[in-house]
Amino acid sequence: MSTAVSPLAPTDVPELPPLAGVRLATAAAGIRYKGRTDVLLALLDPGTTVAGVFTTSKCPSAPVEWCRAKLKGGKARALVVNSGNANAFTGKTGRASTALTAKIAAKAANCTLGEVFLASTGVIGEPLDATKFNGVLDMLAHDVTPDGWFDAAKAIMTTDTFPKVATATVKLGKARVTINGMAKGAGMIAPDMATMLSFVFTDAPLSAGVLQALLKSGVEDTFNAVTIDGDTSTSDTLLAFATGAAEGAPKISRASDPRLKAFVKAFNAVLADLAEQVARDGEGARKLVEIVVEGATSKKSARRIAMSIANSPLVKTAIAGEDANWGRVVMAVGKAGEPADRDKLSISFNGIRVAKNGARDPSYDEAEVSAAMKHPKIQIKVALGIGKGRDRVLTCDLTKEYVAINGDYRS
């Protein structure tokens, strides 16, 4: 884990309030790191519903497979998360580790195996010694508190430089409900569903089907619109839990229920906040980069072009060097395989147009653009001029520190 906090870290960190039906605790089990917490246990009240979205990787981790199988039950009583070891590419040993972890957790939480959800993050390919959870989870079940949110977010970090948390309160019917979320992720981020790990909790009474619909829809323009390095993790897991413990809140069993409107907006805002924090904590990042593509043939086409730009090492290194190199943006647009007309293309950096109609803008001023590129947040806007499709994705620059962090990640 990095020691220096990212210069892009949020200056205002919200204090997550207690959320009815959720209690948390953390411990140091010595999974990989010494002298820091690396296990989180969240206990959930009976009746809690669960939803999840997972990596699209064809080589998923054992915990991802476990959660996918248990999600069908729609109920959750315990969540166990460990950092330091992803329990991915670990074969039969990995599956045995998840089974043993779940067995220990079910006993500690006094629930069934089908109500236990697991997530692991860290090194791929190394066996996870689940016996380390023996005793630890019993102790955590005894120590859980309603206000352990920030410590929980810290325990799931790997190369993250700061804990990622977000919260919102909103009216559902005449009742006030709370949404709390946490995430971890700084590298191997090109989610195709969520981020490496993220967990969102609410005390709203939502059926598992409603929660799943909201989650699936909510990730599209939040976590799925973030990339750090173009590499989709084996472990990507986003789980949402609804305890239903908010006093006086109406039970929601249809995703189309009009009473959900404000809740959906707040829920998506929490996801968006967490997703942006992931982009801000990209390994070695010094710049938060927003890519806006407009005038495409469709939103889907705009997304693919934006991702082509966001994942280009040449674009990202130019931003790290504070160079408004629009030629590299043109390259990334052209290689995306989507409809584009070179002679209609216009490109702006932080609101300053540098290229227009397929050539350098006549009013281009090097000094003005160089000054704009020194900002910690850079927006690249590409206007294709061939349709009405628009989309936006977030990424970060690519620095020497990224290479340093990933060059010795296992050592």
Image: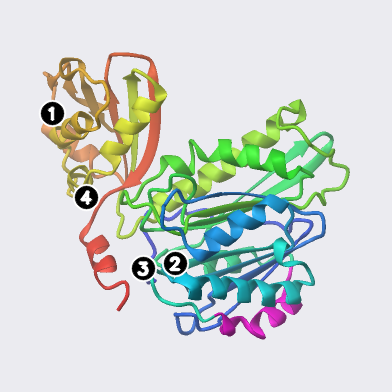
Residue that carries the numbered disc 1 in the rendered image: 365
Cα–Cα span, label 1 and label 2: 50 Å
Counting residues from the start of the chain, the first of labels 1 and 3 encountered is 3
On residue 4, the disc is: 3
Residue 124 or 240: which is nearer the viewer?
A: 124
Q: Judging from the image, what secondary structure is the residue with disc 2 in?
A: loop
| Residue 338 image position (x, y, % from top left) | 27, 25
Cα–Cα span, label 1 and label 3: 35 Å
Circle 4 residues within 10 Å: few <14, some 14–19, many ≥20: some
Residue occupying the point 51% across, 84% down: 30
Cα–Cα span, label 4 and label 2: 32 Å
| Residue 327 image position (x, y, % from top left) | 13, 33
Q: Amino acid at mark 1?
A: Asp
Q: Judging from the image, what secondary structure is the residue with disc 3 in?
A: loop
Residue that carries the numbered disc 2 in the rendered image: 88
Please provide the residue range marked out in magenta.
130-145
On residue 214, the disc is: none
- Residue 85 covered by magenta stretch: no
